[in-house]
Amino acid sequence: MLGGGGKGAKVGIPALIVVVIGIFLSQAGGGGGSGSGGLDDILGQLSGDGSTQQSAPANPDGTKDAQYQFVGDVGALLEDFWSDEFQASGESFEKAGLVIFDAPTDTGGCGVGQPQAGPFYCPPSQKMFIDFGFYQQLEDQLGFDGDFAMAYVLAHEYGHHIQNLLGINDQVRQAQDGASQAEGNALSVKMELQADCFAGVWAKDVYERLETGDLDEAIDAAQAVGDDAIQGSNANQESFTHGSSAQRKQWFTTGFESGDASACDTFA
């Protein structure tokens, strides 16, 4: 499905930093915060800042070789793309680590990662944590379908790594201090939608390598993990922490159509 390196549109990373800093200097209030776990925290967000690695561990029993290979390949493509983008903007880049786990795991700064708690990125260790058992739960309960749905999840989590490198994560966490729950949730949504947009920017770069239907898989996955889709008929917008299905589709599409991370200003 995917293979080789890529040459994407070069992003205005310094400009993106300026935009976000300007927003936080001009407004009080905060945002974000972890969800309560399970399906309402699917694309998890845990706070901090931190170190590096990029390797999928060897599969211990040989039963999921294809999944391990796919995740490793997508991780390498994400690393190559964002490294090139940062280099083009004259910014320092550090690659994200990738940990595939199926038992309680020390995250290196975000507590103990629990199986089936959802994929997440830990800023202190600069690592993404992926549990295949939870991905199966997504397929069973939310209708995830196809390998590029998993690629979208990985690209979204790598988007959080980019936010961490740009200092956006720290700015949001600082703005959360003393904020109301509603204000906190609102900024959390902006963080998550920006990570979706960054995922779309990467998808644009690899578009020529995609099979028919791959892009639809990513869009369907983004919509499936909207807060309203997860909460169902009892959806309460003030409690949203990741964005509605329509918002997630919109910002992934914005990133894809622009191919430019500077278009991912969800804080405007």
Image (cartoon, rainbow, N blue to C red):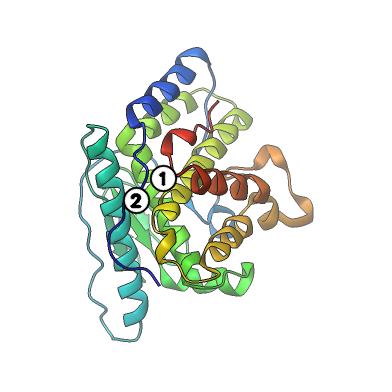
Under tag 2, what secondary structure? Answer: loop
User: What residue is drawn where x is 32% and y is 43%?
Assistant: 123
Determine the CA span between mark 2 and mark 1: 9 Å
Q: Position of residue 24 (x, y in %)?
A: 46, 19
User: What residue is drawn where x is 27% and y is 78%?
Assistant: 59
**Against 131, is 167 above or below?**
above
Identify residue for label 2: 111
Task: Say which of 21 and 174 sits in front.
Answer: 21
Asked if disc 2 and disc 1 are in contact, CB closer than 8 Å, the reply is yes
How many labels were placed on the picture?
Answer: 2
Mark toward the start of the polypeptide (2 vs 1): 1
**In the rendered image, is residue 254 in sight?**
yes
Q: Which mark is residue 46?
A: 1
**Against 153, is 158 above or below?**
above
Task: Say which of 112 and 17 sits in front.
Answer: 17
Task: Say which of 111 and 183 sits in front.
Answer: 183
Query: Which part of the image, by quadrant, shows the N terminus?
Result: bottom left
